[in-house]
Image (cartoon, rainbow, N blue to C red):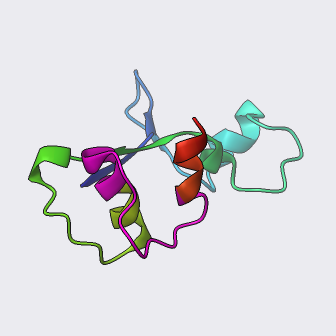
Amino acid sequence: MYHGKTHFIGKTNGEVIHQDSEITEKMNLVKDAKFNKIEIYPEYYLIQIDRYQDLVKETIDEWIYWFKNDNVKKGSSSKHIDDWKKT
């Protein structure tokens, strides 16, 4: 599994915008926000389902098992894992 985040780098100056940067304040990305302004941008997970070994160690493994096998592994306890049957 791979994890990626959105990063912003100035096109002309190469400056990186950090979560607590003065630049984010100047840009008014989200006025009067009560949360980290950079957190509103997406994160990505790339999962190679064909390489997954069907070993469930964490709750994310229960979802990967479902993606790969099209059924919920017995004993799965992830929040909303049984809701897939309703779609």
Residue positioned 84% across, 48% down in the render: 33
- Residue 35 vs residue 19: left or right? right
Magenta segment, which residues?
Answer: 64-81
Place residue 86 in its image quadrant: top right
Residue 46 visible: no
State the count of labels.
0
Quick one: which residue is furthest to the top in this view?
A: 12
Q: Main secondary structure of the magenta part?
A: loop
Q: Nearer the viewer, residue 23 or 58?
A: 58
Q: Nearer the viewer, residue 42 or 22?
A: 42
Where 29 sits versus 45, above or below? above
Place residue 15 in its image quadrant: top left
Say which quadrant the C terminus sits in.
top right
- Residue 33 vs residue 18: left or right? right
- Residue 37 vs residue 64: left or right? right
Residue 60 in percent (x, y) is at 40, 63
- Residue 56 vs residue 62: left or right? left
Say which quadrant the N terminus sits in.
bottom left
Residue 8 visible: yes
Residue positioned 41% across, 29% down in the render: 13
Residue 37 in percent (x, y) is at 69, 47
For residue 2: magenta? no
Q: Nearer the viewer, residue 13 or 24?
A: 24
Where 17 sits versus 77, above or below? above
Residue positioned 89% across, 46% down in the render: 32
Residue positioned 12% across, 46% down in the render: 50
Residue 78 in percent (x, y) is at 52, 68
Residue 70 in percent (x, y) is at 33, 45
